[in-house]
Image (tube, helix red, strand yellow):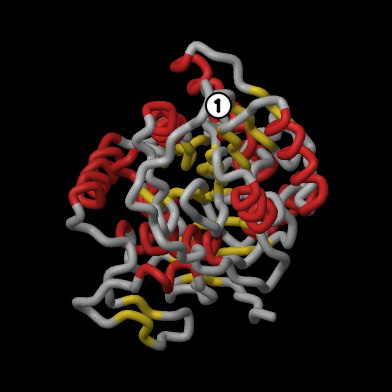
Amino acid sequence: MIASMLRAGAVLALPFLAAGSAQAFELKAPPKIAFIYATTVKDGGWNEAIDQGREALADELHTKIAVAENIPEDATSLRNAIDLYVKRGYNIIVGTTYGYSEAMAEAAKAYPDVAFFNASGVNNSDNMESFYARTYQAWYLAGMAAGDMSKTGKVGILAGFPVGVVNWDLNGFARGVQAAKPDAQTIAVFTNSWWDPVKEGQVAEAILDQGADELATNLSAASALNAAEKRPAGAIGYQLDMSAAAPKQIITSVVFHWDKYLVPRIKEVIAGTWKPEPYGWFEGLSSGVVGLAPWGPNVPESTKEKVAAAEKQIIDGDLKVYAGPVLRQDGTEVVPAGKVLPEEDLWTMDYFVKGVIGTMPKTQ
């Protein structure tokens, strides 16, 4: 997923607060666009989902978009790539990982006539905008489906590191499970890696051995879905439609549609109407940037109807995933009834909600 967000035990910082410009950004030359990736584009998950957005953008604008792969998340490597692109006349540059945040912010200062975007970043300025999605909304819906379909009352999910944007996915999933089946439990396990197909397969087997009959992955590899297909158990993928990895057992996947953000936003840059969001761009189901893949063959119509109703409520603002009461794993209250978890507390979420079986590592 977010290739080098923070190491184990860290918490994603609140997006950098920058003063917004009252004046729209204007390009000084015809648009030339470049995307920079920390690893290979065809990773089966995070990068590939963003690259599908890039391809849609290229088709929409009828233009070629430059791509740089395997640019490490260190300031020197990224800055060298950016400097080279700027020298060649590129004036819209899109980064694709949290690890680029600081170096891209410095480049934005050095090149005020270049528009910068960064997926999962935390820095914003008059010519730079970071963007991410309210993934916990879609994970809540996936959890509802898993909970509704579970016969054992136990479902599972595996993830990489305990950072804020991962924890809100796991907890959103668990709250969705409980919305469908109040007494159901969610087994959550961190692999302490963003990409380790062998370990992910082993963790998946261990979760299934604990009685989970529905299994979700918050990672890019298909190992967990392969394990669910063999068991058999219901399977939920992430980032892309992972149905090919579990064609018989797939329930759905939580997927990104980054074209819903990239196409209109970069068109604004070209039109001279773009004003970067001072706190970054952060939207959910209503934007279409995040959602669910088509349902699998075993999902009952009744489950689909329940999830569709909840999705409409979320989009309409009538259902808040973290509306109180929200209780920690040990039963202590985080959000009382009638209140909603404050926005800034999403980013620093460092606990499991009640109903989750698993250990949340202490922050370092």
Q: Residue at x 74, y 48 (%)?
A: 195
Instruction: State the residue in front, 217 or 161.
Output: 161
Mark 1 burial class by Cα count in 10 Å: few <14, some 14-19, many 20+:
many
Instruction: State the residue in front, 17 or 83.
Output: 83
Residue 331, position as x, y percentages in the image: 41, 85
Q: Residue at x 58, y 41 (%)?
A: 232
Q: Is residue 226 left or right of residue 123?
A: right
Amino acid carrying label 1: it is Arg
Quadrant where the C terminus is found in the figure = bottom right
Q: Is residue 364 above or below residue 126?
A: below
Q: Residue at x 17, y 57 (%)?
A: 318
Q: Is residue 258 left or right of residue 202?
A: left
Q: Is residue 346 left or right of residue 96?
A: left
Residue 109, position as x, y percentages in the image: 61, 52
Report helix, strand or loop for mark 1: helix
Q: Residue furthest top?
A: 62
Image quarter of residue 240: top right
Instruction: State the residue in front, 259 or 176.
Output: 259
Residue 247, position as x, y percentages in the image: 55, 27
Is residue 149 visible in the rendered structure shown here? no
Residue 197, position as x, y percentages in the image: 76, 44
Q: Is residue 217 above or below residue 26?
A: below
Q: Residue furthest bottom?
A: 332
Q: How many labels, in total?
A: 1
Is residue 47 visible in the rendered structure shown here? yes
Image quarter of residue 11: bottom right
Q: Residue furthest front?
A: 28
Q: Is residue 22 left or right of residue 73?
A: left
> What residue sits right under mark 1 in the picture?
54
Q: Residue at x 38, y 53 (%)?
A: 21
